[in-house]
Image: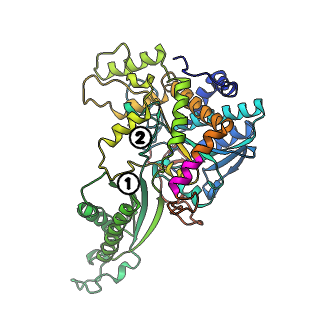
């Protein structure tokens, strides 16, 4: 699609860099997509970004905020100071080869990780935008600083609250964030007023410390360990915590607004001998809601449940935070600036090879292959006011935030724009049809399908960064709005500080799923069954 506006020479330099480096960007994306490393375990992905950014002229701090797979890269000097970032964590149980049929990756347990959103494309798209803006700065002698963050563990909203608490987001003038569109109406647009809500996550660890003190008298006179009543122990505690919280879920909050509480088992019992009590159990709770007050009320129920379950099962319980995010703060001046870049560069487009891949998937699923198998919204712009109206149509009037993502941490430190990029999605053969999850993952790994999104993201990020570098009046308008919404900027009457303490240490030591090296080679932490 032809651009709707005259593009400045500075911005054209950035866009030309992206166009000239399309093959390299495609290769870069494939590299990260194939690493497919899950939250807090993105060792190869983070190392690749650090090496690449240094080769591109950035100074890079590895392991920022004491997170092994995080980084902070800096280019340039002086103001404005602008931020962008990469995410690169994959999701367990989503392993898939880039083929038009269901096929987990070779040599790994089928429940290994894969990219769903995909963060592989998010990260490389943002990297492309930052490098293109850097190229424009160098070519045209522009002052300013670009800081590019490596943000691990987004799937548990992990790193950004930690970076914020440690002061990494202080002193910025603006942030440019982006994400692959996750619905047809939310592609090639910007978020207007209704930004994401809050996400908190906490791990409860139950430990049976003194099993011998349980029920000191025995029903049998025979001193035999197999005849004695054993302490309930940590596995019983884990199960009771799970069921008790299910029972009390309806009592957490009124039935209004959109909020969720979900759980995951991290460790369960240690597979002890049958007559010995399981000594440790860990369960993680993650909850999302539109206000911090609602988050606190959910927490109070979880804490009460954990305390009483520990008493019932002869365990002690400790709680450990994984993350606590704030809610998103809108900035419509910057949202408008970001959307003008979509109008200038136009939406992404597919080639015939991508369409052929989409038709092959449809054929696999018994769907009559379509001439154009992709949703039309991928190649269209969506006005942010219309998207905002659609989002608001399903929310109660009082609810100002919806769903969750940890980019919201940036919004409290400087004006922030949220770009939504068109991603490959297939047309439904009839209303209500949902494609299997492997389809999304396969599309994300096929270069012909995902490269247009990566390039489009790079162009949108680069264009917005260049505008912020070259249009001081636009940046001033965004900063004035930030001051107004926070009641005076950082520390203002309505400003919300990071929720984690300044010395918070990310929970990288917990039992997160990961790849492991054994005498059998590299494998998923759940071993691949032997083929008999």
Describe residue 512's horizontal placement relative to residue 295 as left or right.
right
Eye-nearest disc, 2 or 1: 1
Horizontal and vertical percent position of residue 254: 25, 60
Q: Secondary structure at mark 2?
A: loop
**The C terminus lies in quadrant:** top left
Residue that mark 2 sits on = 530
Dominant SS of magenta comes to helix
In the foreground, 55 or 45: 55
Residue 9: image quadrant is: top right
Q: Residue furthest left?
A: 219
Depth check, front residue: 87 or 27: 87
- Residue at horizontal 34%, vertical 37%? 390
Q: Which mark is residue 290?
A: 1
**What range of the chain is rendered magenta?**
479-486
User: Where is residue 382, by image quadrant?
Assistant: top left
Q: Is residue 215 left or right of residue 532?
A: left
């Amino acid at each position: 699609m032809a651009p709707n506006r005259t593009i400045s020479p500075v911005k054209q330099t950035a866009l030309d860099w992206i166009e000239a480096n399309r093959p390299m960007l495609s290769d870069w994306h494939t590299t990260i997509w194939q690493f497919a490393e899950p939250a807090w375990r993105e060792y190869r992905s983070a190392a690749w970004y650090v090496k690449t950014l240094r080769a591109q002229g950035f100074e890079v701090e590895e392991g920022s905020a004491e997170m092994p797979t995080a980084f902070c890269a800096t280019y340039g000097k002086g103001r404005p100071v602008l931020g962008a970032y990469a995410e690169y964590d994959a999701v367990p149980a989503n392993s898939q080869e880039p083929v038009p049929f269901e096929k987990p990756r070779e040599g790994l347990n089928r429940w290994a990780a894969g990219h769903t959103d995909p963060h592989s494309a998010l990260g490389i798209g943002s990297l492309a935008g930052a490098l293109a803006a850097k190229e424009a700065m160098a070519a045209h002698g522009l002052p300013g600083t670009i800081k590019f963050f490596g943000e691990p563990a987004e799937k548990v909203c992990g790193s950004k609250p930690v970076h914020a608490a440690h002061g990494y987001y202080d002193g910025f003038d603006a942030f440019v964030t982006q994400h692959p569109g996750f619905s047809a109406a939310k592609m090639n647009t910007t978020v207007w007023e209704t930004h994401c809500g809050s996400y908190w996550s906490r791990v409860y660890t139950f430990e049976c410390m003194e099993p011998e003190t349980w029920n000191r008298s025995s029903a049998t006179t025979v001193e035999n360990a197999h005849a004695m009543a054993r302490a309930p122990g940590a596995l019983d505690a884990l199960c009771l915590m799970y069921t008790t919280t299910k029972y009390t879920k309806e009592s957490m909050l009124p039935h209004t607004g959109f909020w969720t509480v979900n759980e995951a088992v991290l460790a369960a019992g240690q597979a002890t001998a049958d007559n010995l009590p399981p000594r440790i159990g860990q369960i993680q709770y993650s909850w999302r809601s539109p206000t911090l007050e609602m988050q606190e009320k959910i927490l109070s129920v979880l804490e009460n449940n954990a305390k009483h379950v520990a008493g019932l099962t002869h365990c002690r319980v400790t709680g450990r935070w994984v993350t606590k995010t704030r809610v998103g703060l809108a900035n419509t001046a910057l949202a408008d600036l970001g959307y003008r870049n979509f109008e200038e560069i136009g939406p992404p487009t597919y080639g015939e090879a991508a369409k052929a891949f989409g038709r092959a998937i449809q054929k696999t699923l018994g769907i009559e292959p379509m001439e154009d198998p992709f949703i039309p919204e991928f190649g269209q712009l969506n006005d942010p006011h219309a998207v905002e109206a659609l989002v608001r149509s399903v929310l109660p009037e009082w609810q100002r935030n919806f769903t969750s993502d940890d980019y919201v941490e940036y919004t409290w430190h400087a004006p922030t724009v949220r770009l939504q990029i068109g991603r490959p999605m297939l047309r439904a053969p009839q209303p209500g049809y949902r494609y299997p999850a492997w389809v999304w993952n396969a599309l994300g790994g096929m270069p012909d399908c995902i490269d247009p999104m990566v390039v489009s993201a790079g162009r949108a990020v680069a264009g917005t960064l260049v505008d912020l570098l070259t249009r001081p009046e636009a940046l001033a308008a965004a900063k004035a709005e930030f001051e107004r919404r926070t009641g005076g900027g950082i520390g203002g009457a309505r400003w919300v500080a990071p929720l984690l303490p300044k010395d918070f240490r990310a929970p990288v030591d917990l039992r997160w799923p990961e790849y492991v090296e054994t005498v059998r080679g590299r494998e998923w932490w759940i071993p691949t069954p032997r083929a008999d």
